[in-house]
Image (cartoon, rainbow, N blue to C red):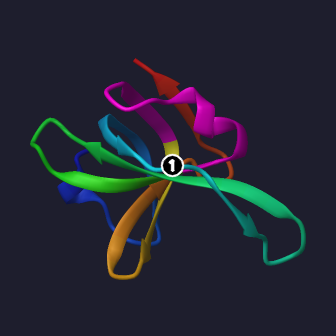
Amino acid sequence: MKISELMANESFDEITLTITGKSDPREVLRKFGGAALVCDLTGEDEDGDTVQVVLWNNDIDLVDEGEKILITDGWVKEWDGQLQVSTGRNGRITKI
């Protein structure tokens, strides 16, 4: 799948992205209690389009800037008018 084909509030089978930016992880409070670490990254597809990638907890250390990743069984949401992709509840991330 390409970034231009992503739709908010829908799942996707797989997308390949090159990570072009990575912010410092930050701690957030979860809706139902507890805290988690979250990190925002920028991913670019083969067409040069970009999308925000959100990684949580242990997934944050799996990826560094400049690496290529494959997200399978992921999820798309919209936040502040911008699409974001993540592994969601059932997805996974793999370095290529």
In the displayed structure, does residue 66 sit left or right of residue 45? right
Judged from this view, the residue extending furthest toward the left is 47
Q: Which quadrant holds the N terminus?
A: top left
In the displayed structure, does residue 48 sit left or right of residue 83? left
Q: Nearer the viewer, residue 61 or 91?
A: 61
Q: Tell me the residue at 59%/50% (across/down).
A: 25
In the displayed structure, does residue 74 sit left or right of residue 65? right
Total tally of numbered discs in the picture: 1
Q: Secondary structure at mark 1?
A: strand
Rendering coords of residue 5 (x, y %)? 23, 57
Judged from this view, the residue extending furthest toward the top is 96
Judged from this view, the residue extending furthest toward the bottom is 80
Q: Nearer the viewer, residue 14 or 17?
A: 17
Q: Tell me the residue at 34%/26% (across/down).
A: 68
Rendering coords of residue 39 (x, y %)? 55, 52
Q: Which quadrant holds the C terminus?
A: top left
Q: Tell me the residue at 14%/35% (across/down).
A: 46
Q: Is residue 62 magenta?
A: yes
Rendering coords of residue 18 (x, y %)? 29, 33
In the displayed structure, does residue 20 sit left or right of residue 62? left
Residue, disc 1 = 74
**Looking at the picture, does residue 62 appear above or below residue 81?**
above
Q: Dot 1, crowdedness within 10 Å: few (<14), some or many (≥20)?
A: many
Rendering coords of residue 15 (x, y %)? 35, 39
Give the amino acid at mark 1: Gly
Q: In this picture, which residue range is highlighted in magenta?
A: 55-72
